[in-house]
Image: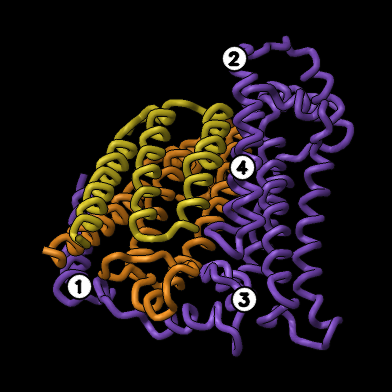
Amino acid sequence: MISLLLAYITITLFAMVLLGIYGVATRSNLIKKIIMLNVMGDAINMLFILIGYRLVFPVFPPIYESHITFEEFLSRAVDPVPQALVLTAVVIGMAMNILLTTYAIQFYRLHGTVDARDMAEIVGGEEE
Amino acid sequence: MIELHLLILVIVVSFGFVFSYLAMKEHDLLKALALSSVQSTFFALGFYILAAPDIVLAYLAIAVGAYTALVILAISKTERYEVGE
Amino acid sequence: MKRDAVVAFSFLIAFLFIAYAVTARNVLGLGGTELRPLGEFYLSHSFAHEGLTSHSPEVVTAIVWNYRGFDTLFETFVFFLAIMGALSVLRLDGEQLRQARELEATMPHRKMDLIVRATTKLVVVMIIAISASIALHGHLTPGGGFQGGSAMAVAALLLFAAFSKFTLERKGLTLRHTISAYAVGLALILATVLAPVFLYGGKILEINLLPGEAGLFNLDVGEYTAVTFGFLTVFLVLGIPEWVFKNVLRRELND
């Protein structure tokens, strides 16, 4: 039962990653590409946190509190390393969003379009 | 009892997948953004179940607050509707 | 049409391969009940009384700022560079900024409802209090500089939507002030990082930066200031209406 549920969760998360890649590749609007990129990033972050999870009950967050003993804390707390990495990834993802959105707005101001199919004619007209 | 946690995660991940699929299919960008925010809210619940309170605090403020406002500003400065194929 | 079929087929193959590897072979090592050795080291050393301790019961903040300090330091710089990149694309110089002010002042002044304004004032005070408690207790309870800063950015956005950018600037929250506050936050982080070198000849970002919890506290406060005012800078620039920008840029073209 437990392994079945875990398999369902991981497969759905990987399907979301593939869905994000598919959206980035096939949608032509730049803002839509940014939205789908975030869907992909969210799924990857969730998968990363899931690697650090432990199948014990009750499970504690990695914050030591004084009403439990240290041995009990060690036997029940989840792995803190993936959480520290994902915390970095969330903030860097937001910085990346700010930069991408800014470039999309500036491209719209200069050329009046945010469609990736029109960008090829505007930017590089020399091929073929 | 650990099955209960995993069942909640199954529900969270399923709804997240469905809403992100709907966001991909939507041609109105504001609606797509709202659907992806719903997916972010479900994921915040998932992070809480996975015993990561630090991530919940950062992720809720960024993915539901700041990111949504940023993209709404971007949509208001560019086009609202996506041109179909 | 043929290209679509090829793309769909390759995605199906990738999906089946990943599903096989994750479920049948368990390549990610999911579903264990034991800690990994690295996680056990951090959990047992973070609040110990001797050894490589960082005097913090909050293990995630201890890893972020002490054990993996260089990672987070350069991440702060990446965030700074992203915001400066956005600012350098969207910026207006002094004369253009003055023109934009004049154009904004001609806009009809629309006020939100009294209920909306009163509720926003109450909620903003609450959000500021909560974000300060998240950030300043970051080394004891869940939270830290990033979390508090992003919560504070939400409060700024709420003010932005209920009142206007014009009101915020009249109250003294101009672009110059937010960038100065951002620089102050970054300077506090750098000072805390460099302090052990000059105080007792240690190395940069050594574990046990300053006596007791002072190191983690200073870094959290610096990061709180930096993230808050970084977000605020971007939203102040993006909040200028599009027709003002177009007018200003057209004048520049005509000159």
Q: CA distance from mark 3 to mark 1?
A: 41 Å
Q: Chain of mark 4?
A: A
Question: x, y percentage for residue B32?
Answer: 38, 33
Q: Secondary structure at mark 1?
A: helix
Q: Secondary structure at mark 3?
A: loop
Mark 2, residues whose alpha carbon is within 10 Å: few (<14), some, or many (≥20)? Answer: few
Badge nearest the viewer, 4 or 1: 1
Question: Label for residue A102?
Answer: 4
Question: x, y percentage for residue C175?
Answer: 79, 39
Q: Quadrant of residue C54?
A: bottom right
Q: Secondary structure at mark 4?
A: helix
Badge nearest the viewer, 3 or 1: 3
The colour one sees for chain B in the rendered image is yellow
Asked if disc 2 and disc 1 are in contact, CB closer than 8 Å, the reply is: no
Q: CA distance from mark 3 to mark 2?
A: 46 Å
Give the residue pinned by disc 1: C21
Q: Chain of mark 1?
A: C
Q: CA distance from mark 4 to mark 2?
A: 34 Å
Residue at the image point whose x is 46% and y is 41% from the top: A116
Closer to us: A21 or C194: C194
Residue extending furthest toward the front: A67
Q: CA distance from mark 2 to mark 1?
A: 56 Å
Left or right for C41, reference C140: left
Asked if disc 3 and disc 4 are in contact, CB closer than 8 Å, the reply is: no
Give the residue pinned by disc 2: C115
Badge nearest the viewer, 2 or 1: 2
